[in-house]
Image (spheres, rainbow, N blue to C red):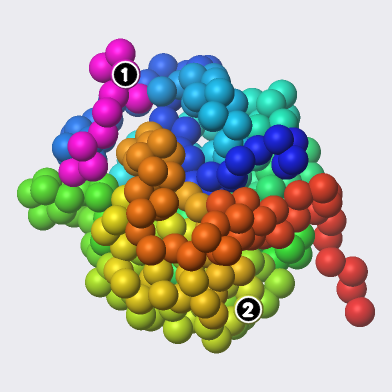
Amino acid sequence: MDIDNLIAIDTHVHAEVSCCQPPDLFGKEFDDAADKYFGTVLRQGRRPTIPETIDYYRERKIGFVMFTVDAESQMGRRRIPNEEIAEFAANNSDIMIAFASIDPHKGKMGAREARRLIEECGVRGFKFHPTVQGFYANDRMAYPLYEVIAEYGLPAIFHSGHSGIGSGMPGGGGLRLKYSEPIHLDDVAADFPDMKVVIAHPSWPWQDEALSICLHKPNVYIDLSGWSPKYFPPQLVQYANSLLKERMLFASDFPLIHPDRWLDDFQKAGFKPEVHHLLLKDNAVRLLGLGAKPEPAQAG
């Protein structure tokens, strides 16, 4: 990644449209409900392709981390291939980094896939969404996956708090918010100190839990995605300005939240000027280990 020429690094960008397989319209009502909830601005009446997203970020000189969400077991919807995202990242490495997503219900096969994606495809982290994947983050079912991620010292991003996915649908689309209470990540951070745990989004209504875990566990970060900064809980801004200024990350949730809006509102949300460079880029550089190739930890 061309760090010196980037004004920021967005650590939370979704791949929404595959270029190598037809759209899976099963469960499209979840997309429609999320667009309504977020007030998503769709160009050409659809979500952007990966190449369109690359052009969007390159024009703005913002680096980004991209991933899909594999919820095939819970939602029955085909994921975008992790390999597709990794290939685009390899061909656009000045601006883009690929994370992968693997449904934890895939067990040891999922762990095998994770290792292959790291070693053969250059994936540099993983994304989990407990609400749509239907699991508690500290469920031992997911630990074989975490073991591989920790072995390589890579980050894992976990959705936390309220979910825009399912909001407004009858019964919330059958999704349970309980899975994304951040306290379950305390076990994960304790059991895998070599894995960087990123708590995604302001964790409303459990914001103080997320801040406590981040204060207590040095391998924990918080990404600031999914909300406009003008709506951030005041304690989140307070800790970003002080004790946790080196472990919070600029993140948008594109295409649901656009970075233009996020960055504009960030300037007015009470963040001290002296922490801007940390939140917008420097913390992400450290989290992502930019310039370093992930290698397995040495035994003994």
Residue 119: quarter of image: top right
At 75% across and 55% down in the image, what residue appears?
A: 289
User: Height in image: 214 above or below 105?
Assistant: below
Residue 111: quarter of image: bottom right
Q: Most extreme residue toward the top, as rendered?
A: 44
Q: Is residue 50 visible?
A: no
Q: Earlier in the sequence, mark 1 or mark 2?
A: 1
**Viewer-closest of 137 and 243:** 243
The amino acid type of the residue labelled 2 equals Pro
What residue is pinned by disc 1? Answer: 43
| Mark pair 1, 2: CA separation | 40 Å
The amino acid type of the residue labelled 1 equals Arg
Kindly report the secondary structure that dominates the magenta region of the rendered protein: loop
Tell me if label 1 and label 2 are in contact, CB under 8 Å: no
Answer whether residue 151 is magenta in the image: no
Image position, residue 144 (x, y; %): 62, 65
**Viewer-closest of 273 and 7:** 273
Q: Is residue 6 left or right of residue 13?
A: right
Residue 64: quarter of image: top right
Q: Is residue 282 left or right of residue 21?
A: right
At 57% across and 77% down in the image, what residue appears?
A: 189
Residues in magenta?
37-47
What residue is pinned by disc 2? Answer: 218
Image position, residue 46 (x, y; %): 31, 20
**Viewer-closest of 174 and 61:** 61
Numbered mark located on residue 172 in the image: none
At 35% across and 59% down in the image, what residue appears?
A: 269
Q: Secondary structure at mark 1?
A: loop
